[in-house]
Image (tube, rainbow, N blue to C red):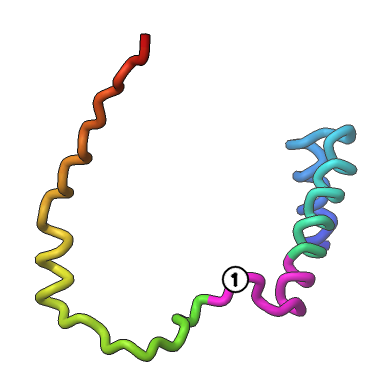
Amino acid sequence: MELVLILVIVLIIFGAGKIPQLGEGIGKAIKGFKKSVNEADAIDVTPPPSDAPAAPPSQIAQAQAAPPAPAPVQSEQRVK
């Protein structure tokens, strides 16, 4: 009984023309969700192993706080 009442309210709110579009959108969303659950992650977020020791956090903070060095200006020489 409750399901029928919900369906009638949805029909009144969205109208008969929008119901197939809503169903199609929900179906695609469910299909995409199932596909992503069953699929392996496309993006690997684990950091690559490195042989070099990591810099201490204090050096990283200093490197981020330092302003970038200005780029060298190259002058053009024109040949006549």
Q: Which residues are magenta?
A: 33-44
Residue drawn 30% across the image and 20% down it: 77
For disc 1, the neighbor class at 10 Å (few under 14, some 14 to 19, many from 20) is: few
- In-image side of 76 versus 47 (left or right): left
Q: Quadrant of the N terminus?
A: bottom right
- In-image side of 6 versus 43 (left or right): right
- In-image side of 20 versus 44 (left or right): right
Compared to 20, does 78 lie above or below? above
- In-image side of 55 versus 26 (left or right): left
Nearer to me, 71 or 19? 71
Compared to 66, does 51 lie above or below? below
Nearer to me, 80 or 17? 80
* Quadrant in the picture for residue 4: bottom right
Q: The disc labelled 1 sits on which kind of residue? A: Ile
Compared to 14, does 26 lie above or below? below
Residue 47, position in %: x, y?
A: 45, 81
Residue 26, position in %: x, y?
A: 78, 54
Compared to 75, does 10 lie above or below? below
Residue drawn 17% across the image and 71% down it: 60
SS under mark 1: loop
Q: Is residue 69 magenta?
A: no
Judged from this view, the residue extending furthest toward the front is: 80
Judged from this view, the residue extending furthest toward the top is: 80
Residue 63, position in %: x, y?
A: 15, 64
Nearer to me, 79 or 67? 79
Residue 35, position in %: x, y?
A: 78, 70
Nearer to me, 78 or 14? 78
Residue drawn 26% across the image and 84% down it: 54
Q: How many marks?
A: 1
Q: Quadrant of the C terminus?
A: top left
Q: Which residue is mark 1?
A: 43
Residue drawn 15% across the image and 47% down it: 69
